[in-house]
């Protein structure tokens, strides 16, 4: 039993495998390599390709390490900016709280001045008399002089209106308590 060639079951070669063998210089004559050497021509090319691939992979690793270093620097910079911004935010919050406190103080003073303005003017006049102008009667101190006293209070408190108003308010309260 001979089997006709059309019915033989030989392993089928994949088309890409055929092309690779042909590209490597393989032929039906059994020659390998482009010059017919004993497989060294193809081996040299493979070795050269291997070296090239290794070098390319090494360059890729170096490039990725460099990119990673840059990203780490950027993360560090962003962390420091974040910390700085958090500090500025906290400072702004503190300023807002201080402004809110001052606003409450001003509202309290405005309410006090609206309700008891004559008492405050009298307290300012008494404060002025206590400061060395006792020869003037309280009724002789004009509103302009009371404003001058307020300006002096402002000047003695480093031009801080909150402190000056609080000092004047405390002084007025003390004077009104001693008068009663």
Image (cartoon, rainbow, N blue to C red):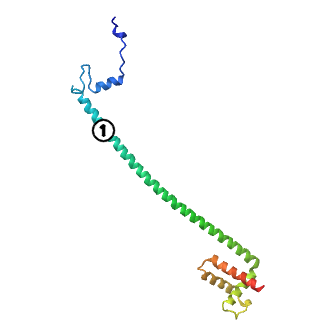
Q: Residue at x 62, y 81 (%)?
A: 154
**Can you give x and y, in whole percent of width and height, for residue 9 in the image?**
37, 13
Q: Residue at x 37, y 44 (%)?
A: 61
CA neighbours of label 1 inside 10 A, class few (<14), some (14 to 19), many (20+): few
Q: Where does the N terminus fall, quadrant-wise?
A: top left
Residue under circle 1? Answer: 52
Give the image quarter of residue 116. bottom right
Give the image quarter of residue 168. bottom right
**Can you give x and y, in whole percent of width and height, for residue 123 in the image?**
72, 84
**Can you give x and y, in whole percent of width and height, for residue 164 in the image?**
64, 79
Q: Residue at x 33, y 10 (%)?
A: 5
Q: For this view, does 98 lie left or right of residue 12? A: right
- Of residues 36 and 15, the one drawn nearer to the viewer in this rendering: 36
Q: For this view, does 55 lie left or right of residue 136? A: left
Q: Is residue 142 visible?
A: no
93 in relation to 10, above or below: below
Q: Is residue 167 visible?
A: yes
Question: Please, which residue is most extreme toward the right here?
Answer: 180
């Amino acid at each position: 039993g001979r089997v006709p060639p059309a019915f033989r079951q030989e392993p089928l070669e994949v088309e890409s495998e055929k092309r690779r063998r042909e590209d490597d210089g393989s032929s039906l004559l059994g020659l390998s390599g482009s010059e017919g050497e004993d497989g060294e021509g193809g081996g040299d090319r493979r070795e050269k390709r291997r070296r090239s691939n290794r070098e390319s992979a090494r360059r890729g690793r170096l490039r990725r390490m460099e990119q990673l270093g840059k990203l780490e620097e950027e993360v560090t910079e962003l962390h420091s900016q974040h910390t700085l911004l958090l500090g500025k935010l906290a400072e702004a919050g503190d300023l807002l709280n201080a402004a809110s406190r001052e606003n409450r103080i001003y509202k309290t003073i405005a309410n006090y001045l609206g309700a008891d303005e004559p008492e405050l003017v009298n307290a300012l006049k008494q404060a002025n008399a206590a400061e060395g102008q006792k020869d003037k009667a309280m009724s002789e101190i004009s509103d302009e002089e009371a404003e001058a006293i307020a300006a002096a209070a402002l000047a003695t408190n480093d031009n801080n209106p909150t402190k000056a108003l609080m000092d004047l308010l405390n002084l007025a309260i003390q004077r009104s308590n001693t008068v009663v």
